[in-house]
Amino acid sequence: MKIISVSDKNEMSKKAAQIILELIKEKPNAVLGLATGGTPEGTYKELVADHQKNETSYCQIHTVNLDEYVGINPEDPNSYHSYMESHFFKYIDLPKDQRFLPDGKNTSVEACVHYDNLIESLGGVDLQLLGIGRNGHIGFNEPGTPLTMGTHVVQLTESTRKANARFFGSLSEVPEQAITMGIGTILKSKKIVLIASGEEKAEAMNRMLHFSVPDDCFPASALVQHPDVTVIADEAALSLIK
Ligand code: F6R
C-alpha cells in the first residue's frame, strides 16, 4: 500500500485527479470505477477543469460506480445517478451508454450478478476510486460483510445513515439499504486509489493502516491483500497515525 500524505483536501483532490488523468493518457479507453460522497467532489471538479482546459476526452472511457441507494429513482436528486450527473458527467464527453451505476430499483440477485458480469465484460476496472466510511466501509460494504462478495444489497448501519443524512433533508429520508459492488468486486480492480480527508476519518485511517491481514469486522482492511493500492490522505485524516 502506497501512502501519499498531502496538506489538505484540495491537494488530495488534485493528486487523485492527476493519477486518473495519467491513466487516461496511457489508456484512453480505460474503465474507471467511481465513488460518490463528499470526498471525491473536488476530484471531479479537477477533472472537469482539466477537460475544459486541456480537452482530455472521455469518449472511449467506460465508468462503473460503486453503489446506489435501494428504492431511489435515478432522477431523484439524492440518487447517486444524479450525483454523478451533476458533479461530473454533464460536463464531460463521456457517452451516456458508457456510464454504469447499480440500479437501485432492481436489486434482484440476477441484477447484482449482471453488474459484476458487466464489469467483467468491459475487461475489468482499471482504476477504482474509493472513499472510506468512518466505520471502515468501502463501497457500502459495512463491517461484517464477507470480504469475497460480489455486488449485493446491504443494510446500511445507523452510523452510515447518520453520516449521509447531511445530503438529505433528514435522517428518516436516508434509505435503509443500498446496492454495492462487493469487496470481492472491488479487489478485482487493477489499481485502487483511496482518498480520505478530515479528522472524522482519522480513526478509520489509523485502523486501516495497521492491518496486516484482512478482517471482515473492518472492510477497508481487505485492501492489504491488493497489490496496487494508493492511499491519498490529508494531514487531518492521518493525524492519529503513529
Ligand atoms: C460512495 C461510497 C462510500 C463513501 C464513504 C465516504 O460511493 O461508496 O464508501 O466513499 O461513505 O463518504 P464521504 O466521502 O461522504 O465521507
Image (cartoon, rainbow, N blue to C red):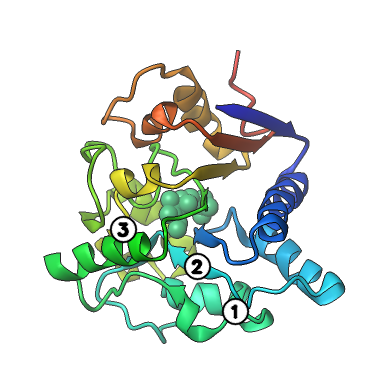
The secondary element bearing badge 3 is classed as strand
Answer yes or no: disc 3 within 8 Å of ligand 1. yes
The quarter of the displayed image where residue 48 is located = bottom right
Q: Which residue is mark 1?
A: 94
State whether residue 78 appears in this view: no
* Number of numbered markers: 3
151 sits left or right of 8 in the view: left
- Amino acid marked by disc 1: Leu
Q: Residues within 10 Å of mark 3 (few under 14, many from 20)?
A: many
Residue 143 in picture, x, y percent from top left: 28, 37
| Labelled pair 2, 1 in contact (Cβ < 8 Å) | yes
The quarter of the displayed image where residue 17 is located = bottom right
- Which residue lies at the image location 39% right of the left edge and 51% below the top edge? 139
Mark 2–mark 1 Cα distance, whole angstroms, equals 9 Å
- Amino acid marked by disc 2: Thr
Answer yes or no: disc 2 within 8 Å of ligand 1. no
Q: Which residue is mark 3?
A: 180
Q: Who comes first in sequence, dot 1 or dot 3?
A: 1
Q: Give above or below for 136 relative to 26.
A: above
